[in-house]
Image (spheres, rainbow, N blue to C red):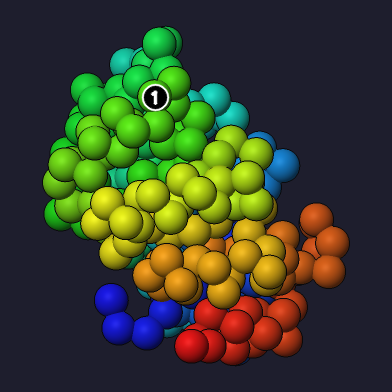
Amino acid sequence: MTGSLLEVIALDVRDAVAAEQGGADRLEVVADMAADGLTPAPETVAAIAAECPLPQMVMLRCDASFTAGADVLDRLSRDAKALAQAGAAGFVFGFLDGAGAVDLAATEALIHAVSPLPWTFHRAVDHAADIQASWRAVRLLPNLATVLTSGSPTGVGEGLSVLRGRADAGDGSIILAGGGLRAAHVPALLDFGIRAFHVGSAVRAGWSDPVEWRLVRRWRDLVERD
């Protein structure tokens, strides 16, 4: 990757336009940030596409859990089709089984449903029972663009050593660092060779406030520093 990638969470058109104005490279489009992001409506994606040229990575998730049965996968597959038609450039998803391992069957089913679009494996990877095994499984999956990870269930601050280890193991190019990401973490992440960053609440004045373009600009400048 040349330069740094800055992805900003957007809930609506206002967020998307502010993110673009501030210098974001792409959006993660979600509903319900309080649940760590759920599937948005196709109408939201279409409205953003009409007003903002940034690529939209759209969340596919029905609830706050990391598991998916056959009924959930059927629903998400239908959602993916409608969202792609509305303008999604890619998707964000990933599942664990009851034992805390990457649910390859569920994840591969959704990869097939969204193909040929790229996708991001979200922070389920940080909640796996065996972090190393989860990474080995995820990195071999097809059409994978990035892995959204903080290195720890509690956030980047506690996960820096894991992120450094993954970067040293050759995964730096697919790491999208996010989840409790703070400005103070960025210099270390850049030193590790990580060049993709994901921000949400850090570009809002408050949890439920809209994205502020000036805060996005600060992050743009921060992640570009040598």
User: In this view, which residue lies farthest toward the top?
Assistant: 98
Q: Position of residue 76 (x, y in %)?
A: 37, 34
Q: Depth check: 2 or 207 in front?
A: 2
Residue for point 80% across, 56% down: 208
How many numbered marks have been drawn onto this rendered protein structure?
A: 1
Residue of label 1: 130
Residue for point 29% across, 64% down: 173
Kind of element beneath mark 1: loop
| Picture layout, residue 50 above or below residue 133 | below
Judged left or right of residue 224, residue 75 is: left
Residue for point 50% across, 66% down: 189
Q: Position of residue 93 (x, y in %)?
A: 39, 41
Q: Depth check: 171 or 146 in front?
A: 171
Three-letter residue code for mark 1: Asp
Residue 222 in which image quadrant: bottom right
Judged left or right of residue 116, residue 10 is: right
Residue for point 63% across, 59% down: 181
